[in-house]
């Protein structure tokens, strides 16, 4: 499971559950907030403000990535492989 959480100070985080697995051939994947579930590279090319890079996941298990700025206006968390230029997963924000 992937969730957006806010701490008492108002900072936002993308949090991966302890059972998160990174069984991808590239071994590291970028985590982005995006304004649609379309390919990250296409959204970024259309308008760089459509995609916000949050960080990189490189291992299995629980991880927390700080969101620089705010999640406001973004609708999806996307796991993207920069090397393959492919989205490996997208989850809508609620």
Image (cartoon, grey):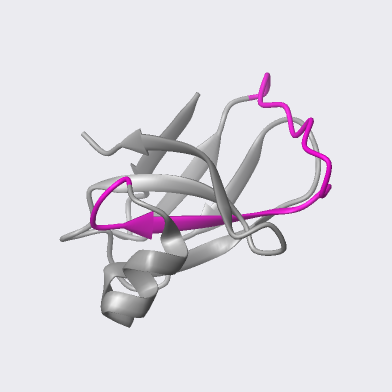
Residue at 83% across, 47% down:
27
Residue at 36% across, 60% down:
11
Instruction: State yes or no: residue 23 in magenta.
Output: yes
Q: In the picture provided, is 66 more to the left or to the right than 44?
A: right
Height in image: 90 above or below 57? above
Q: In the picture provided, is 30 more to the left or to the right than 67?
A: right
Residue at 44% across, 52% down:
13
Q: Picture quarter containing residue 61? A: top right
Height in image: 81 above or below 68? above
Instruction: State yes or no: residue 38 in magenta.
Output: no
Please provide the residue range marked out in magenta: 18-37
Q: Position of residue 39 (x, y in %)?
A: 42, 54
Instruction: Please identify the dominant SS of the magenta region.
Output: loop
Q: Residue furthest left?
A: 73
Q: Position of residue 3 (x, y in %)?
A: 41, 34
Q: In the picture provided, is 14 more to the left or to the right than 55?
A: left
Q: Position of residue 53 (x, y in %)?
A: 48, 67
């Amino acid at each position: 499971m992937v969730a957006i959480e806010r701490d008492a100070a108002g900072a936002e985080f993308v949090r991966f559950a302890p059972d998160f697995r990174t069984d991808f051939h590239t071994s590291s994947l970028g985590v982005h907030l995006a304004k649609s579930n379309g390919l990250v590279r296409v959204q970024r090319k259309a308008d760089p403000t459509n995609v916000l890079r949050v960080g990189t996941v490189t291992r299995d298990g629980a991880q927390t990535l700080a969101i620089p700025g705010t999640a406001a206006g973004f609708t999806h968390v996307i796991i993207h492989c920069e090397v393959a230029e492919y989205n490996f997963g997208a989850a809508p924000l609620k």
